[in-house]
Image: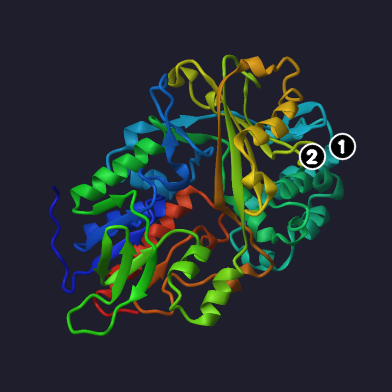
Amino acid sequence: MTTTIAPKGALDVAVIGAGFAGLAAAYDLAGSGHRVTVYDAQATAGGLASGFRDASWDWPLEHFYHHVFLTDHAILGLAREIGFGDRILTLRPVSAQRFGDRTLALDGVLPILRFPLLPLVDRVRLGAVGAWLKVRRDWRPLERVSAHDWVPRWMGARAYRLIWEPLLIGKFGPERYRQIPMSWLWARLHARTFRLAYFAGGFQALADALVAAGAARGVTFRLGTPVASIRQSAPADGHPPWQLDVPEGRTAHDRVVFTSAPHLLARLAPELPSDYLRGLSQLDHLGAIVAVLALDRPLMHQTYWLNLDKREFPFLAAVEHTNLVSPAHYGGDRLIYLGDYLPADAALFAAGDDAVLDAWLPYVGRLNPSFRREWIRRSWVFRAPYAQPVVSLGFSQNIPPLATPLPGLFLASMSQVYPWDRGTNFAVAIGREVAALVARSADGAP
């Protein structure tokens, strides 16, 4: 075990959630000499990026599709820091969008300039404004105007109707998409790359490596241990001020870092002030549903990521994972995700797996007319009620700080990484940020 020198005022810290934010926070806090216990209701670490494995596969596969961009310095840097750098795979898959019965790539300068569905002047305008957003650094003025209003004005109405409006509707739904601030779209264009990275062994391998690295620093992991409540204890000299109720009993800690959904914190910590709880309840989000198909042959041949128009398909994307990494790692299976974001109270969340497949599979034939259900060796359906924060105009004013109003209780969630979108990279970044804040609080810093 790696030993660390305990700082003056070393803390006993509970980290709730073993996703990448919680794993990064625990690793850093233990590295600063604090005693850390990580709790998660799931039996494996990794959160939404955790994986599952079929008997014939060498690598696990994420329950929900994942990759990283080459500009995702937080997660790539942490991977290298723990000695996982040789497991980073750099890739250049094909990403495309569906237009009627045509699949067309928009993943580079040349594909944009060759795009046949817009006049040349619109293609040049689309590319030039996209390049300007790529280098622009000040996003704050852009959060005061919606993408629905900004993009037609600067990129052109035809480009908006054809390319961007279907993506916004697919991501946020017809009721919400007109209110999404341009800062959200800026962040996607500014921070992302056409080249991608993945990890040998999948994201589960990286999560497991972070568990091992944290354990080497003294972190205790209590996976498969749900937390039922977070409460302040009665004041007493030398007694930790926070108590967690878990199935085995009650535990006490000096600090608590909560890395799951804000609305869950509101339920578990009712002692939070009412106005703060009200603010948490107003942080909107969508859930995710994916169907994973293990096919005996390719579906899209070369395309890895295909954006779809939700006005024509019941799911927003088809992702052929084995066009990103070799099917040899999965027993020769060709693995396809069909994915959608929906309100957590949508009927499909309560429907059985067969109902999801029955609703979606008839549309797979539109992606490949040869497709037959007999191609499917096996299928899985996964659901997550908190998967995509929904942001609004001026959203930066609604973000709760990492330190809650109750001293010693911290929140680090996907809803706080704005203007960036959800993802493992920004989970790592916010996890390390909250760890630094907690460590400073050990010395009495605010």
**Circle 2 — which element?**
helix
Residue 255, numbered label: none
Which of 175 and 420 lies nearest the eye of the viewer?
175
Whether residue 108 appears in this view of the structure is no
Q: Dot 1: few (<14), some (14–19), or many (≥20) neighbours within 10 Å?
A: few
Mark 1: secondary structure: loop
Within-10-Å neighbours for mark 2: few <14, some 14–19, many 20+: many
The residue sitting at 39% across, 69% down in the picture is 410
Q: Position of residue 188 (x, y in %)?
A: 61, 50
Please say if the residues under marks 2 and 1 sit with CB atoms less than 8 Å apart.
yes
> Residue 422, position in %: x, y?
54, 52
Reading the image, the residue beneath label 1 is 119
Q: Position of residue 357 (x, y in %)?
A: 66, 31
Residue under label 2, please give it: 123
Residue type, numbered disc 1: Pro
- Quadrant showing the C terminus: bottom left
Amino acid found under the numbered disc labelled 2: Arg
How was this image coloured?
rainbow
